[in-house]
């Protein structure tokens, strides 16, 4: 009996520190979430600056390896990045502005054409429906369109109002570059400081998981950003060459939305086909517009994404879509920026926990299983 009581006491002593550690980590996580929610209105330029620093860190490391001091490497990386952004804006803004002005002029004409199409469809439906059913159909269609517009408008307001109330253009112009510079200059020291806070007994494990999160996040973000740039420019140029009005704007927006798997292609196909139907009477020209996006989707799925992003970044498309929409619903645009790092970390930690579980006595019986099947899938 004494031996059993001693063993129970030893087991309780081994379990308690684990629960204390778990409670400590949960308290830190709760404090971080509370901080983000409390200051979400002013965090956006700082998060953007941190994202820019993370994006440019490989360039600064390359300059540092070529004998440039870290402050000079950070300055050169930020300056070249800013010049590239300004160059793109300078080249694209006149064309985008012209297309928006043309869209404002063409909107009444397109509205009348859409109204005529809807009227024609309703007249066709009225031939097989009585007056009561026709009235209910009109009310149902009008109600659903109104709800769709209301939901879409609320979503857009939620995304752009969340975290944007106190953020102005001047804030981004001054605060974000400063934050990006200092974070990029002190990146290695920041990582070393965080590393020193890790309990020494678990430092190797935490470092390995952090490395996997970094590989997952950098592989997806940098690769997908390159895919977005290539697709946006390609779609914009090809749609403009095909004679589609506002084709460049649609192409650029499709490229930007391509950061969310499948959303960019679906948006571009629907928007460009809708404009093509309103603009062209020739079915062949409409087919050309559809072919641009169908071929673009095939090239993206079979060449661009495998080469630039890779198939083993550990972020499933469904998980990416859910995390971005969930982040946008909770914290607006700020939440969408934080969604991918959080999704990458959750994915890596989930796979680590599953590996630990599959190696534990809870999963293994007396004869250790040799089942190598893993979940969730890497791609």
Image: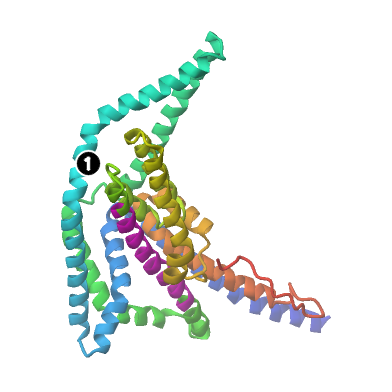
Please provide the residue range marked out in magenta: 211-237
Q: Residue 330, can we see it?
A: no
Q: Position of residue 255 (x, y in %)?
A: 35, 55
**Would residue 281 be found to the left or right of residue 323 on screen?**
left
Q: Which residue is mark 1?
A: 100
Q: Position of residue 284 (x, y in %)?
A: 40, 41
Question: In the image, is residue 230 part of the stretch drawn in magenta?
Answer: yes
Secondary structure under the numbered disc 1 in the rendered image: helix
Taking depth in this image into account, of 109 and 224 the one nearest to the observer is: 109
> Up-down: is 127 above or below 309?
above
**Would residue 75 be found to the left or right of residue 378 on screen?**
left
Magenta part mainly helix, strand or loop? helix
Q: Residue 212, can we see it?
A: yes
Q: Position of residue 324 (x, y in %)?
A: 44, 54
Q: Position of residue 297 (x, y in %)?
A: 45, 56
Q: Quadrant of residue 71?
A: bottom left
> Up-down: is 79 above or below 96?
below
């Amino acid at each position: 009996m004494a031996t059993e009581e001693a063993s129970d006491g030893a087991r309780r002593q081994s379990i308690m520190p684990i629960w204390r550690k778990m409670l400590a980590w949960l308290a830190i996580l709760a404090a971080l979430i509370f901080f983000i929610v409390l200051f979400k209105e002013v965090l956006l330029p700082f998060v953007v600056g941190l994202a820019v620093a993370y994006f440019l860190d490989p360039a600064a490391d390359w300059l540092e390896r070529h004998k440039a001091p870290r402050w000079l490497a950070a300055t050169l990386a930020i300056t070249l990045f800013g010049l590239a952004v300004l160059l793109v804006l300078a080249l694209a803004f006149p064309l985008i502005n012209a297309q928006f002005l043309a869209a404002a002029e063409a909107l009444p004409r397109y509205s009348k054409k859409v109204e005529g199409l809807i009227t024609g469809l309703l007249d066709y439906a009225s031939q097989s429906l009585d007056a009561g059913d026709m009235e209910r159909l009109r009310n149902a269609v009008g109600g659903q369109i109104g709800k769709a517009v209301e939901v879409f408008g609320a979503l857009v307001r939620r995304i752009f109002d969340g975290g944007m109330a106190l953020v102005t253009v001047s804030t981004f112009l001054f605060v974000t570059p400063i934050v990006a510079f200092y974070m990029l200059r002190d990146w290695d020291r920041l990582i070393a400081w965080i590393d020193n806070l890790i309990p020494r007994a678990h430092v190797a494990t935490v470092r390995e998981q952090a490395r996997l999160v970094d590989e997952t996040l950098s592989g997806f973000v940098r690769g997908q950003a390159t895919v977005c740039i290539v697709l946006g420019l390609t779609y914009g140029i090809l749609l403009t060459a095909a004679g589609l009005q506002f084709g460049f704007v649609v192409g650029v927006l499709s490229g930007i939305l391509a950061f969310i798997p499948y959303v960019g292609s679906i948006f571009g196909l629907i928007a460009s086909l809708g404009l093509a139907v309103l603009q062209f009477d020739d079915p062949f020209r409409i087919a050309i517009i559809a072919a641009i996006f169908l071929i673009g989707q095939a090239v993206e799925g079979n060449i661009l994404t495998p080469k630039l992003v890779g198939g083993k970044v550990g972020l499933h498309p469904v998980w990416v879509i859910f995390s971005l929409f969930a982040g946008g619903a909770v914290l607006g645009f700020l939440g969408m920026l934080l969604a991918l790092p959080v999704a990458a970390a959750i994915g890596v930690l989930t796979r680590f926990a599953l590996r630990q579980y599959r190696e534990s006595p809870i999963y293994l019986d007396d004869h250790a299983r040799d089942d190598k099947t893993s979940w969730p899938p890497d791609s």
